[in-house]
Amino acid sequence: MNTLELAEHGPVIPVIVIQKLEDAVPMAQALVDGGVRVLEITLRTPVALKCMEAIARSVKGAIVGAGTIRTVDDAQAARDAGCQFGVSPGYTSEIGHYCRNIGLPLLPGVATASEVMRANGDGYGFLKFFPASAAGGIPLLKALHGPFADVAFCPTGGISVETAPQYLALPNVKVCGGSWLTPADAVAAKDWARITRLAQEVGQLR
Ligand code: 3PG
């Protein structure tokens, strides 16, 4: 898979932190029911890999990816858990080359022109822009479009349902990432219907 295909499934990739394994499948099902199929499950909790496996196995239509890939071991574990893609908060050539070697499509994170040059030089043309709002937001994406008109971005970090349309209107933004589709209080209450409604809402954003 080319990671740009991820953007064809909708305008927002949810960035998901799952604390309890029991929540993984119903949460993913709620998102898929709302039309959001591409799911970034972050490697930030002890149960993350088991959650990825469970979703990949049980939620039809879900396209499961691993977020927070910081090391080659993370990339290998994500691949072994059945993930179809990986997302890293930053970029190293070591991770870029490793993911290519194991066949794990990678959406690598960048925040500066130098990082764009490094990732792009290693063959990556679709990049996560992280942390989007803190690193310069829309003005920085507009500025990067000048020298890097052939590079596409998935801004993530500090984006909301209110600000996403402004990002999505930029020519170099294909999709946005954000955690607002799975609010901690909705998950704690197992309010899956609310998560489905939030997913349905983003379908209208572009
Ligand atoms: C993260 O680091 O958790 C992601 O970038 C999501 O950020 P957000 O919570 O600001 O959407």
Image (tube, rainbow, N blue to C red):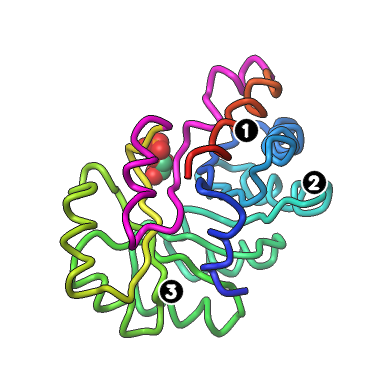
Q: Amino acid at mark 1?
A: Gln
- Give yes or no for contact between labels 3 and 1 (Cβ–Cβ under 8 Å): no
Query: Relative to the observer, which residue lies in front, 189 or 36?
Result: 36
- Ligand 1: quadrant of the figure: top left
Label 3 CB less than 8 angstroms from ligand 1? no
What residue does disc 1 label? 200
Q: Amino acid at mark 2?
A: Val
Residue 23 lies left or right of residue 100; in this view the side is right
Query: Relative to the observer, which residue lies in front, 35 or 86?
Result: 35
Residue 107 lies left or right of residue 129; in this view the side is right
What residue does disc 2 label? 59
Q: Give the quarter of the figure containing the N terminus.
A: bottom right
- Give yes or no for contact between labels 2 and 3 (Cβ–Cβ under 8 Å): no
Mark closest to the chain's N terminus, 2 or 3: 2
Q: Which marked residue is nearer to the observer: mark 1 or mark 2? A: 1
Residue 33 lies left or right of residue 116; in this view the side is right
Q: Quadrant of residue 70?
A: bottom left
Is 187 within the magenta?
A: yes
- Give yes or no for contact between labels 1 and 2 (Cβ–Cβ under 8 Å): no
Magenta segment range? 161-190
Mark-to-mark CA distance, 3 and 1? 34 Å
Q: Which mark is residue 95?
A: 3
Q: Amino acid at mark 3?
A: Ile
Q: Residue at x 18, y 55 (%)?
A: 140
Is 91 within the magenta?
A: no
Q: Which marked residue is nearer to the observer: mark 3 or mark 1? A: 1
Measured as percent of width and height from the top left, residue 185 is found at 54, 17
Q: Is residue 189 above or below residue 34?
A: above
Q: Residue at x 53, y 59 (%)?
A: 7
